Structure formats: C-alpha cells, structure tokens
Image (tube, grey):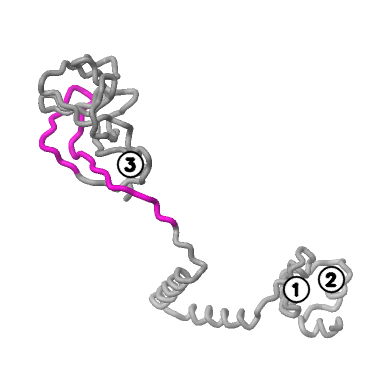
C-alpha cells in the first residue's frame, strides 16, 4: 500500500503518515483507531509495544454495535430482560465458575442466658437453631448459650455467646451449671462456683448443683450466617 493509498483510506494527512513511518511522531488516538481498522491489528502492535498482532474481527464488532444500538432503543423493562438473559447464558457457559459455598452447620442456641453474675432463672429448656460457618470449634459444640454479667471477665464478657460441649466437667473447668434452678457460667471449684472477676465471692454448691456442659470457647459473631 502506498502512502497515497493509506491517506485515502484513513483520511490522515500525508505528512502525518511520513512522520509515523520515520518515527518522528506517534499517531494520536483518532489516527491510531483509523490505522487499526485498516491494518486489522492493535494499536499496541503498531507502536511496537507487543509482537502480538491481535487481529480483530471487525464484522463481529459491527454486529455488536448493531446490538448495542437496538438495546439503547429498548425501554427499561426490555433492557432488564436482556441483561437477565445475558447473565443466565453467561452462568451456563464455560466462562462461569460457581463460587464455592462455605460449609455450614446448624447450632442449637439457648433462648435463655446463663449468668456471669449472681444467677439468673432458667426455666424449661428453650432452644432455637442458627446457621454458622463450619469450623473445628463450632463442630465440637453441642449447643450455645448467651451470657450476661461481668463476673467471668476478662475471659468472658457480657453479651458473649459461649460454645458448650455436653460432657462432664472437672474442678478448674469453666462450665454452664444449674444451681437451685438458676443458671451460671462459672469455674468449678471444690463444692463452689468461682468467678474469674475477683469482685465476686465464690458461690457454695448444694445437692441441686448440676453441670449442663463444659464451655469450650466463644461463638464469633462473624460465623453466624444471615
């Protein structure tokens, strides 16, 4: 192709073509598009930034432009329908990778709190279920119990939800217990319930004492699924 032929096809000044060929100037955006269309290669190839010609299918580009023009003439409802169809076809194509869903489990949680203070009444067992992310700690828990009060600080705080495993507890363990019909979260002492907060005195145990389960950790709120 001669310089004159290229000028006629691109409508670019002949002086610009000469400057491009001799490396005196680089084409601006408008000129680069014109040269891309004529030579069917990318601007990056023309400027020497890559060895890949990146040939374009300009017939396909024309079809896409026609679709865009038609889409722009649709009303809001029509556009929404088109977008839904595109998303569905994309999902069904090989380009779509179904995001991996996190593994979850269902955990029973008491609707009544256990006290980290001086005791709170616990009536008949009442539990609901929440869905949480599956992990080693949550998998070991048989149920969860909200706590109220500050007697177990600094390890447990008012409003925490503790994870409990229904197993026997020994002296030194922290457990959810019943004493005279009231529920506590305490450290087990020798015939006494011990608070981690030194502001609270030990609570003596009697024959009504019963261990509900051993506390194995705290439920992270981020584990709870909406």
| Residues rendered magenta in the picture | 100-127
Return the disc, 2 or 3, that comes first in the chain's sequence: 2
> On screen, 212 above or below 103?
above
Task: Mark 1: give few (<14), some (14-19) or many (20+) Cα within 10 Å.
Answer: some
Reading the image, the residue beneath label 3 is 139
Q: Classify mark 3: helix, strand or loop.
A: helix
> Residue 186 appears at what percent x and percent y?
24, 23
- Which residue corresponds to the image point at 11% horizontal and 28% vertical from the top-left? 181
User: Image quadrant of residue 217?
Assistant: top left
Locate residue 19 relative to residue 83 in the image: left or right.
right
Mark 2 and mark 1: Cα distance apart in space:
10 Å
> Residue 137 appears at what percent x and percent y?
35, 37
Indicate whether residue 113 is drawn in magenta: yes
> Residue 92 appears at what percent x and percent y?
45, 71
Return the disc, 3 or 1, that comes first in the chain's sequence: 1
Reading the image, the residue beneath label 1 is 31
- Badge 2 vs badge 3, beta-carbon distance below 8 Å: no
Locate residue 79 relative to residue 200 in the image: left or right.
right
- Badge 2 vs badge 1, beta-carbon distance below 8 Å: yes
Task: Mark 2: give few (<14), some (14-19) or many (20+) Cα within 10 Å.
Answer: some
Reading the image, the residue beneath label 2 is 20
């Amino acid at each position: 192709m001669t310089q004159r032929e290229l000028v006629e096809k691109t409508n670019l000044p002949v002086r610009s073509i000469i400057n491009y060929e001799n490396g005196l100037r680089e084409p601006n955006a408008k000129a680069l598009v014109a040269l891309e269309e004529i030579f069917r290669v990318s601007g990056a190839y023309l400027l020497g930034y890559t060895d890949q010609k990146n040939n374009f299918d300009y017939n396909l580009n024309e079809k896409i432009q026609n679709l865009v023009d038609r889409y722009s003439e649709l009303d809001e409802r029509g556009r929404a329908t088109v977008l839904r169809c595109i998303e569905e076809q994309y999902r069904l194509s090989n380009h779509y990778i179904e995001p991996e869903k996190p593994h979850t489990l269902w955990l029973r949680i008491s609707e009544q709190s256990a006290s980290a203070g001086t005791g709170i009444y616990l009536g008949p067992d009442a539990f609901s279920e929440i869905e949480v992310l599956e992990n080693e700690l949550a998998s070991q828990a048989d149920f969860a119990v909200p706590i109220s009060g500050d007697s177990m600080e600094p390890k447990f705080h008012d409003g925490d939800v503790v994870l409990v495993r229904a197993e026997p507890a020994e002296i030194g363990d922290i457990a959810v217990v019943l004493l005279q019909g009231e529920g506590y979260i305490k450290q087990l002492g020798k015939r006494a319930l011990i608070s981690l907060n030194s502001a609270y005195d030990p609570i003596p145990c009697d024959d009504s004492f019963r261990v509900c389960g051993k506390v194995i950790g705290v439920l992270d709120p981020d584990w709870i699924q909406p």
